[in-house]
Amino acid sequence: MIEQTLVLIKPDGVLRGIIGNIITRFENAGLKIVASKMQWIDKDFSKKHYSEHLEKAFYSGLETYITAGPVMAMVLEGNDVIEVVRKMVGSTEPKTALPGTIRGDYAHISTKHANENKKSVCNLIHASSNIQDASREIMLWFDPRDMYTYKRSGDEWME
Ligand SMILES: Nc1ncnc2c1ncn2[C@@H]1O[C@H](COP(=O)(O)OP(=O)(O)OP(=O)(O)O)[C@@H](O)[C@H]1O
Ligand SMILES: [Mg+2]
């Protein structure tokens, strides 16, 4: 089924200058970028994006991390894209993320982002985890007028 998902290259990915490497992986996999923008979010926006984690002990560290610099936000479209992108991203903790995944290949040097004594796992990238989250997150980040429908060469091979 053709789906859409929200991907964020988090501040560590932007500040390390590896936006291109990450986007290339998605393009090579045949996923279509239907919207993108850079945005430096504030704490209020972080609370909306990560609303499911507000009560967690690591939330304040996560907020410091995700607001530490701009993120590159995009909506990717493709067959079963939510699950496919989560697989490409790899597991949350970089040291357990498998080689071949984005976190496994690029995130080992990112460890913890300090905030008082609470720290966040810095793992380069966010991807929506299910269809409900994807729909909520896409509405939070993008105006439908800034999302585009277009045909890429190769689309004729897709059902
Ligand atoms: N136990 C933890 N300690 C510190 N930081 C954490 C911890 N668990 C998660 N985080 C941070 O919070 C983010 C959101 O956690 P979540 O459980 O949703 O993981 P994820 O779905 O792999 O990541 P994301 O939602 O950013 O794609 C993680 O990506 C990481 O940056
Ligand atoms: Mg998550």
Image: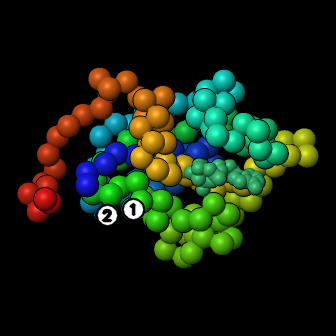
In the rendered structure, find residue 34 and report the number of the disc placed on it. none
Q: Which residue is mark 2?
A: 29
Give the residue at x 63% y 56%.
Answer: 123
Instruction: Locate the N terminus by quadrant.
Output: bottom left
Tell me which label, 2 or 1, sits earlier in the chain: 2
What amino acid is labelled 2 in the image? Ala
Q: Secondary structure at mark 1?
A: helix
Q: Residue furthest right?
A: 117
Percent position (x, y) of residue 65? 71, 42
In the rendered structure, find residue 84 and report the number of the disc placed on it. 1
Is residue 22 at least partly visible in the picture?
Answer: yes
44 or 104: nearer the viewer: 44
Q: Residue furthest front?
A: 132
92 or 74: nearer the viewer: 92
Q: Secondary structure at mark 2?
A: loop
Give the residue at x 32% y 26%.
Answer: 144
Depicted 117 relative to depicted 105: above or below: above
In which quarter of the view is residue 46 placed? top right
How far apart marks 2 and 1 lie (CA) works out to: 9 Å
Q: Are marks 2 and 1 in contact (CB under 8 Å)?
A: yes
Specify whether 34 is left or right of 39. left
68 or 35: nearer the viewer: 35
What amino acid is labelled 1 in the image? Val
Give the residue at x 46% y 50%.
Answer: 130
Specify whether 140 is left or right of 64. left
Percent position (x, y) of residue 89? 50, 61
Q: Is mark 2 within 8 Å of ligand 1?
A: no
Is residue 17 at least partly visible in the picture?
Answer: no
